[in-house]
Image (cartoon, rainbow, N blue to C red):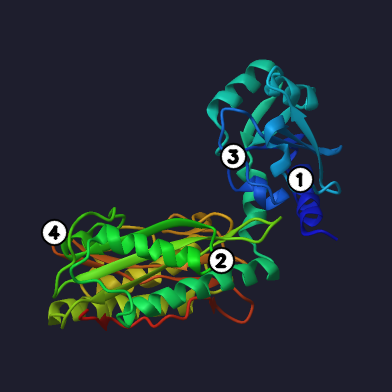
């Protein structure tokens, strides 16, 4: 049985449990997860209509139909012409639906028009139906995540051993090289390649700039992309490692040692049955005890799969228990404003026998002088 048939069956079962009559998926990650097709974000509507009872139909702009890999056992394809109203086609398909859910990232213009054409239908978010299903990865999805992780592991190793020169280059130049290596490693898209040196490393989402990397400073690199095979959705990689361009001062090594210890404890504590809040607390308590708690300013981690950020989130407000198959980052950080920062990140999959850590690149602070 096709993986997409199984996923469609699970979506319908969840719809039945929640009293949802129709699920509508457009741009975003839900559509490729369910069909293998990633819609181009155009003003022309692409939308998969999944009725609770009845056949699924994908409405696609006629000129985009050749891009869709057909899965007739999952959905049929209807190409709409430039003179047709695709919203009206979708509305007709779900006429009579009392409750529908729509993809969270669907363009607002289409939802507004659907509300106007379906006054008797109430709308919710598709993540209410699909989110919990996507959050639990099957063995094939874990394998895809592992392959992607190994690609960025190799790049991290090249960074740590000096194979990627740093001193005298701009952050933007190094970022571009990381992106090229991600693509050369088999990813089809670069999602981000943060390179933050010196005081810039104190900004967690620093945008690589024209600052020239100098000697005797920290360089934080956080990078990842999406890797896929034809006919199936891509799965993401994400890793963060830090190096120092010269011998680090004792103040920074103390900071990094605390980060290293906190991240290790959180990795080991990412157990099935623990909540996202509990795992976040493991790292946060460790950094607080070491005197760095005020400098850990973001959640511990995010889910990963078809999207680089998805459920579940390891944050103090998440009291849902971790399940077998959940995949997420463990990435505590310490950011001292205007001085320096450090972050250490691995992707972990929750397994029945303990955390399955996908990234295996060394986690120690490396000194590079090239």
* Circle 1 crowding by C-alpha within 10 Å: few under 14, some 14–19, many from 20: few
Q: Is label 1 in a helix, a strand or a loop?
A: helix
| Residue 212, quarter of the rendered image | bottom left
Quote the CA–CA distance across marks 3 and 1: 31 Å
The label on residue 17 is: 1
| Residue 305, quarter of the rendered image | bottom right
**What is the x, y in percent for residue 20?**
74, 37
Residue identifier under label 4: 338
* Circle 2 crowding by C-alpha within 10 Å: few under 14, some 14–19, many from 20: many
**What is the x, y in percent for residue 50?**
77, 38
- Which label's residue is closer to the chain start, 2 or 1? 1
The N terminus lies in quadrant: bottom right
- Which label's residue is closer to the chain start, 3 or 2? 3
Q: In terms of depth relative to the viewer, which is nearer, 361 or 211?
A: 211
**Can the viewer see residue 184 in this picture?**
yes
- State whether residue 22 is above or below residue 220: above
Name the residue rendered at 69%, 68% in the picture. Answer: 140
Q: Is label 4 in a helix, a strand or a loop?
A: loop
* Circle 4 crowding by C-alpha within 10 Å: few under 14, some 14–19, many from 20: few
Quote the CA–CA distance across marks 4 and 3: 40 Å
Label 4 vs label 3, nearer the camera: 3
* Circle 3 crowding by C-alpha within 10 Å: few under 14, some 14–19, many from 20: some
- Mark 4–mark 3 CB contact (< 8 Å): no
Quote the CA–CA distance across marks 3 and 2: 26 Å
- Which label's residue is closer to the chain start, 3 or 1? 1
- Which label's residue is closer to the chain start, 4 or 3? 3
Residue identifier under label 2: 327
Quote the CA–CA distance across marks 1 and 4: 51 Å
- State whether residue 77 is above or below residue 319: above
């Amino acid at each position: 049985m096709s993986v997409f048939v199984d996923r469609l069956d699970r979506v319908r079962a969840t719809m039945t449990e929640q009293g949802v009559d129709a699920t509508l998926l457009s741009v975003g990650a839900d559509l490729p997860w369910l069909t293998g097709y990633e819609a181009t974000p155009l003003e022309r509507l692409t939308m998969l209509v999944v009725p609770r009872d009845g056949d699924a139909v994908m409405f696609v702009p006629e000129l985009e139909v050749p891009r869709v890999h057909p899965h007739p056992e999952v959905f049929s394809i209807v190409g709409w012409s430039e003179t047709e109203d695709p919203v009206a086609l979708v509305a007709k398909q779900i006429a009579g639906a009392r409750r529908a859910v729509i993809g969270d990232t669907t363009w607002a213009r289409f939802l507004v028009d659907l509300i106007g054409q379906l006054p008797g239908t109430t709308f919710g978010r598709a993540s209410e139906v699909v989110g919990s299903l996507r959050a639990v990865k099957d063995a094939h999805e874990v394998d895809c995540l592992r392959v992607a992780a190994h690609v960025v592991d190799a790049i991290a190793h090249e960074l740590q051993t000096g194979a990627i020169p740093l001193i005298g280059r701009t952050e933007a130049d190094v970022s571009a090289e990381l992106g090229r290596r991600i693509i050369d490693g088999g990813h089809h898209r670069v999602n981000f390649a943060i390179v933050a040196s010196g005081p810039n490393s104190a900004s967690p989402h620093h945008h690589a700039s024209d600052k020239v990397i100098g000697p005797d400073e920290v360089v934080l690199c956080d990078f990842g992309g999406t890797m896929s095979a034809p006919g199936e959705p891509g799965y993401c990689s994400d890793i963060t490692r830090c190096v120092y361009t010269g011998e680090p001062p004792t103040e920074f090594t103390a900071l990094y040692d605390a980060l290293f210890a906190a991240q290790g404890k959180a990795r080991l504590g990412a157990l099935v049955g623990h909540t996202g809040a509990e795992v976040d607390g493991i790292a946060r308590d460790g950094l607080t005890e070491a005197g760095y708690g005020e400098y850990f300013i973001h959640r511990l981690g995010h889910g990963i799969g078809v999207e680089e950020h998805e459920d579940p989130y390891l944050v103090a407000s998440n009291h849902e228990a971790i399940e077998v198959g959940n995949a997420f980052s463990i990435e505590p950080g310490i950011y001292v404003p205007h001085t320096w920062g450090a972050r250490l990140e691995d992707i972990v999959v929750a397994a029945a026998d303990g955390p399955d850590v996908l990234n295996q690149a060394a986690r120690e602070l490396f000194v590079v002088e090239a």
